[in-house]
Amino acid sequence: MGSIINAQQIINGLQVGSIYALIALGYTMVYGIVRLINFAHGDFFMVGAYAAYGAFFLFNSLLGGHAGSAVAFLVLLCSMAGGGAIALVTNRFAYRPLRYKPKLSSLITAIGVSMFLEYFMSALPAIGPSYRAFPDILPKKLYSIGSATISSYVIIDIVVAAVLMLGLTLLVKYSRLGKAMRAVSQDKDAARLMGIDVEKIIAWTFAIGGVFAGVAGMLNGMTYPRIFPYMGIQPGLKAFIAAVLGGIGSIPGAVLGAYIMGLAETFASAYNSLLGEGIAFAILIVVLLVRPRGLLGEKSADKI
């Protein structure tokens, strides 16, 4: 019985870690570029979920009323667009004017943006503050893998997150945009002298982070089928802790920290649900006391 429980917990932990990883990457990329803890990032996750929610009903109606892979793909694109768009708007109108102001100003603004997005979404008549049931974008199936039972949604979460993280790694290491991002991360003034448009690179960084958060919102809605305007608070905080655990500013660190967080939360919840909710904050305290730079946070030259 113990092995059955452990196998199931590992699968669930990887699924939760995949969601956290997609959100944590946005935190760590933005911090690596502009040294900003964007506390509104969890709300980009929420916006992506609502974009997917609205897109499903729109495209499902236009394409004949049957959920399928075509609708799911279009919904995925809309969740990406929703998260990326709100990230770009936030950067342009909230953070860019404060770029060279004291860091505390940007931090306070980030908290204000987060609260504004939550209350604004709650105030919209078409959305409101109440919970909404997220639709079945794809038919849900159950599979047996060894002694564990795994949902098709869990498989989708893990696979989509893995593909996006691999794509981001390739983008950062081998593309011109990725090289420019690394250059801006290391030295903005030198990058500017080399002809790099620093503000454009920062905008791209926010957009990519927002896209990942938007996808995470859609995946979370599919797996735990309910959404509401404050749904980004807890995942956003936990993803931030995951980024700190792995080493804020390090992409591999954010991924590692997210999966550690997901597994720790799942195993702790098996014993006590309240312990599962609080384990993330216990981990944060321990990391700050023992290794403030995080697990992979020592090298800083290539962080973005």
Image (cartoon, rainbow, N blue to C red):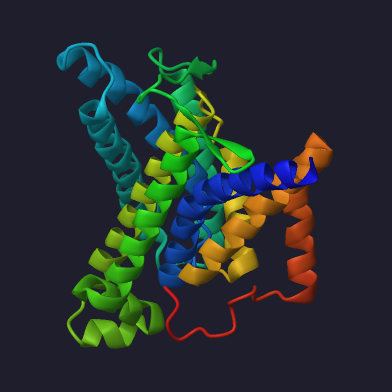
Q: Position of residue 6 (x, y in %)?
A: 72, 47
The x and y percentages for residue 150 are 54, 36
Residue at 45% of width from left, 21% of height from top?
134
Q: Quadrant of residue 65?
A: top left
Q: Relative to 229, does residue 37 appear above or below in the rendering?
A: below
Give left or right: position of 93 versus 60.
right
Percent coordinates x, y for residue 223 in the rendering: 50, 31
Up/down of 173 relative to 222, above or below: below
- Using the image as rendered, state which of residue 42 and residue 25 is in the foreground: 25
Residue 44 seen in the current view: no
Is any atom of residue 171 visible in this view?
yes
- Give the answer, above or below, for where 133 lies relative to 279: above
- Answer with the quarter of the image where residue 275 lies: top right
Q: What residue is drawn where x is 46% and y is 41%? A: 155
Q: In the visual, does 7 lie left or right of 140?
A: right
Q: Residue furthest front?
A: 146
